[in-house]
Image: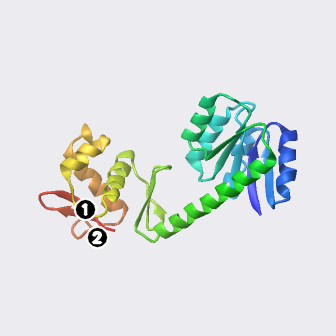
């Protein structure tokens, strides 16, 4: 059973789509009110079908809120024909955009395709979790041994940059140049932030396991 959350104020349209998809073991739970949809426990659903023209809140704002809080595939389903709505929707995190009117068969095909892609992505993430560090660029989060670290924007920027260097030594100048948060503060702030990062991952500064100081160069991240 695929559980789909739908936020759509056209109840007749939602019922027709729900009846069709039920034949394929896809259950739709629809909310006409976007605020009710947002408070419906998004995590328990496998996919979201989202209209844009909604009472009290624009669908693009709903999309932004859901992308910021949850990792769920999103299909925007809208009669709005302005290409900018489609572009903005995809830019802020929607995975697909299906203009109304459409044949329910097409929505079924897109749901199947998106669910397959999402499952592959989850499998990749599970594999990556066996490593020490995992960067989720969409959420601006870094996990360490499966636990999300509580990082400031500067800490996130520096640690994610170090992770991308794949274990190579990084000069202090390189870090300052490539991390916007350090450009005005300089290398002294770098040492403070590195110290905080070590504390947050339980790394001993005298005998570090992960963030190593490289004499005369800068730092190196292992793991």
The secondary structure type at the circle numbered 2 is: loop
In the depicted structure, whether residue 152 falls above or below residue 211: above
User: Does the image show residue 41?
Assistant: no
Cα distance between the residues tagged 2 and 1: 15 Å
| Residue 216 rendering spot, x and y as whole percentages | 11, 58
Residue assigned mark 2: 209
Pointer 1: residues within 10 angstroms few (<14), some, or many (20+)? Answer: few
Q: Nearer the viewer, residue 63 or 207?
A: 63
| Residue 149 rendering spot, x and y as whole percentages | 43, 58
In the depicted structure, whether residue 166 falls above or below residue 63: below
Label of residue 7 in the image: none
| Residue 210 occupies quadrant | bottom left
| Residue 133 occupies quadrant | bottom left
Residue at left offset 19%, top offset 51% = 172
Q: Nearer the N terminus, badge 2 or badge 1? A: 1
202 left or right of 62 in image: left
The secondary structure type at the circle numbered 1 is: loop
63 left or right of 35 in image: left
| Number of numbered markers | 2
In the depicted structure, whether residue 44 falls above or below residue 204: above
Label of residue 168 in the image: 1
Residue at left offset 25%, top offset 51% = 192
8 left or right of 63 in image: right
Residue at left offset 36%, top offset 54% = 160
């Amino acid at each position: 059973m695929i559980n789909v959350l739908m936020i759509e104020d056209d109840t007749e349209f939602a019922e027709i789509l729900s009846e069709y998809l039920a034949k394929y073991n896809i259950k739709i739970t629809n909310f006409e009110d976007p605020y009710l949809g947002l408070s419906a426990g998004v995590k328990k659903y496998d996919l979201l079908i989202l209209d844009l023209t909604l009472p009290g809140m624009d669908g693009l704002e709903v999309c932004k809120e859901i992308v910021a809080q949850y990792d769920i595939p999103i299909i925007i389903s809208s009669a709005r024909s302005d290409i900018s709505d489609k572009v903005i929707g995809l830019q802020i995190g929607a995975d697909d955009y299906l203009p109304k009117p459409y044949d329910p068969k097409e929505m079924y095909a897109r749901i199947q395709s998106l669910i397959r892609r999402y499952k592959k992505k989850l499998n990749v993430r599970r594999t990556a979790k066996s490593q020490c560090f995992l960067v989720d660029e969409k959420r601006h989060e870094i996990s360490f041994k499966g636990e999300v670290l509580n990082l400031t924007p500067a800490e996130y920027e520096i640690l994610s940059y170090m992770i991308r260097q794949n274990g190579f030594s990084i000069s202090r100048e390189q870090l300052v140049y490539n991390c916007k948060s350090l450009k005005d503060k300089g290398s002294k702030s770098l040492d403070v932030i590195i110290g905080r990062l070590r504390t947050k991952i339980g790394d001993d500064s005298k005998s570090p396991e992960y963030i190593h100081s490289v004499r005369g160069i800068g730092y190196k991240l292992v793991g």
